[in-house]
Amino acid sequence: MKKIITLSREFGSGAGEIGQKVAKELGYEFVDKEIILQTARKSGIGAERILDLDEKVPAHFGFTQSLFDMYNAPLDEKLFTIQKDIIKKIGEHGNCVIVGRCANSILREFDNSLHVFLSADSYWRINRIKTQLMPEASESQIIKHMHEVDKARRKYCSYYTNEDFGAAESYDLCLRTSSLGIDKCVEIICSLSK
């Protein structure tokens, strides 16, 4: 039986709902934004500030860093290290479903894990975001936000793991929620985890 399930996702593909349903079905802990709260407690930095940095690359890196800063890891990297340690501890405990934050890469070497990538076609994602996350937003605002979030996640994944976000070789399973539906994805993940 798979004791660790990670869900990586395109924005609006339904990973949160799928993760909650899988966790409930298997009797596992569901972990998503809780990692941010734990990071805030361990770092002493407010949760709102960490949310601003969540799944984003450091604002200043490469040639824009001063020589002095090269010897001190930027706040973003320190927070990633804290989140990485938290994710590993959750993985060691097992019986968990973890959404995002490069958990698939961080827990790659853990036995009994299932790493899933969830995607969906744009129209399906736009409708889902409109009804569940941004009801007051226009379609153009939703599309812009959707592309910004996905772009930030791609950069974050590449920066911290040297992997391509959404590339099949980084996962055990890739599911298209717009084709299969939320409940079928839950059924498939639960079946494979058993």
Image (tube, helix red, strand yellow):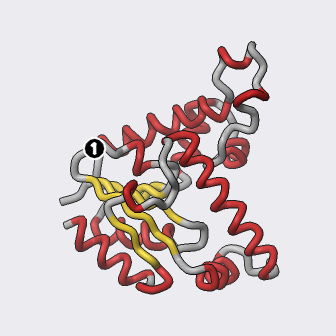
Kindly tell me whether residue 39 is visible in this rendering.
Answer: yes
Q: Position of residue 112 (x, y in %)?
A: 22, 52
Q: Position of residue 179 (x, y in %)?
A: 45, 86
Nearer the observer, 62 or 14: 62
Would you identify the image quadrant in which residue 124 lies?
bottom right
Q: Position of residue 86 (x, y in %)?
A: 45, 38
Q: Amino acid at mark 1?
A: Phe
Does residue 135 sit above or below 33 in this rendering?
below
Is the C terminus in the top left, top right, bottom left or bottom right quadrant? bottom left
**Label 1 Cα crowd, 10 Å radius (few <14 / some 14-19 / many 20+):** some
Residue depicted at 45% across the width and 55% down the height:
31
Q: Position of residue 33 (x, y in %)?
A: 55, 54
Would you identify the image quadrant in which residue 71 lies?
top right
Residue depicted at 40% across the width and 62% down the height:
168
Residue depicted at 41% across the width and 46% down the height:
105
Q: Which residue is mark 1?
A: 110
Kindly tell me whether residue 29 is visible in this rendering.
Answer: no
Is the N terminus in the top left, top right, bottom left or bottom right quadrant? bottom left
Nearer the observer, 130 or 66: 66
